Image: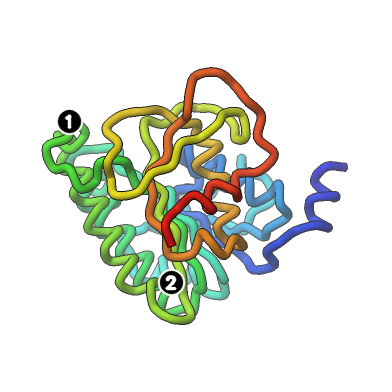
Amino acid sequence: MEDRVMTEKTKYSGKVLVAGATGRTGKWVVSRLQHYGVPVRVLTRSAEKAKTLGDVEIVEGRIQSDEDVAKAVSGCAGVISALGSSEVFGDASPGEVDRDGVMRLVDQAAKAGVKHFGLVSSMAVTKWYHPLNLFAGVLSKKFEAEEHLRGLFGKEGRSYTIVRPGGLKDGGPLLHDLHVDQGDRLWSGWINRGDVAELLVVSLWTDKAKNKTFEVVNEGEEEHAQKSLEGYYDKLAS
């Protein structure tokens, strides 16, 4: 019943491609899109693995392939990238995934006429000396991808939202007060993956989310139910 109600009230009618959909954050992105009745397509290396995501259109392919990525974004109005590296070297390294993979996705999305691009990045991407950057320069690679996205989707007719979360915890959305900031001034903090997903999903239809880059962590450890996260975009500088 809940899914039918949300579908009737959906605020976004376009199809959305999710990259990194079988990852821990990507699964939450898919789940929240489905919650709002938004049609979902996923780009995945394993169609079998993607079948666990429920009612999604599956494009099997690699983020390293221009042809596969072009096929995946074709006909989509929005893209949400939850891509993330898992190895120091090779196809799953920060250079291949967090930088080149995201940049390839941005390029093909722009060519295909995608209107909005949401990106999961990271807190401290401008701080080369942050301990997280010891993982093959992952923060620096993410920042390069951010800059590329801002350059292509910050133009008239397109928009972007870049979420820079703190440490990611496996948990659902709308359970905690959040703290948002801009300028990459936060050094530590935690946030549920579900909240990161929720912020990017609602950015599809929230005007104040357009062309924003911001950091976000939990305000505190205690749970405090939220009705919506859209209001956090009101706190960001225009």
User: In the displayed structure, would residue 99 be above or below residue 25?
Assistant: below
Q: For the view shown, which residue lies furthest in the left direction? A: 129
Q: Amino acid at mark 2?
A: Ala
Residue 128 is left or right of residue 194, and the answer is left
Q: For the view shown, which residue lies furthest in the top direction? A: 222
Can residue 51 be seen? no
Residue 128, how many percent across, how many down? 13, 42
Residue 103 is left or right of residue 200, and the answer is left
Between marks 1 and 2 in the image, the one whose residue lies nearer the viewer? 1
User: Quarter of the image holding residue 152?
Assistant: bottom left
Which quarter of the rendering shows the N terminus?
Answer: top right
Front-most of 204 and 35?
204
Is label 1 in a helix, a strand or a loop? helix
Q: Which residue is mark 2?
A: 109
Residue 94, how many percent across, how many down? 23, 46
Residue 139 is left or right of residue 2, and the answer is left
Residue drawn at 42 percent across, 57 percent down: 237
Q: Amino acid at mark 1?
A: Pro
Residue 122, how many percent across, how many down? 33, 43
User: Quarter of the image holding residue 154?
Assistant: bottom left
Q: How is the image coloured?
A: rainbow
Front-most of 238 and 192?
238
Front-most of 13 and 94?
13
Residue drawn at 45 percent across, 36 percent down: 179
Can residue 157 be seen? yes
Which quarter of the rendering shows the C terminus?
Answer: bottom left
Residue 113, how many percent across, how many down? 49, 79
Mark 1: give few (<14), some (14-19) or many (20+) Cα within 10 Å: few
**Label placed on residue 131:** 1
Mark 2: give few (<14), some (14-19) or many (20+) Cα within 10 Å: many
Which numbered disc, 1 or 2, marks the residue that appears first in the sequence? 2
Q: Are marks 1 and 2 in contact (CB under 8 Å)?
A: no
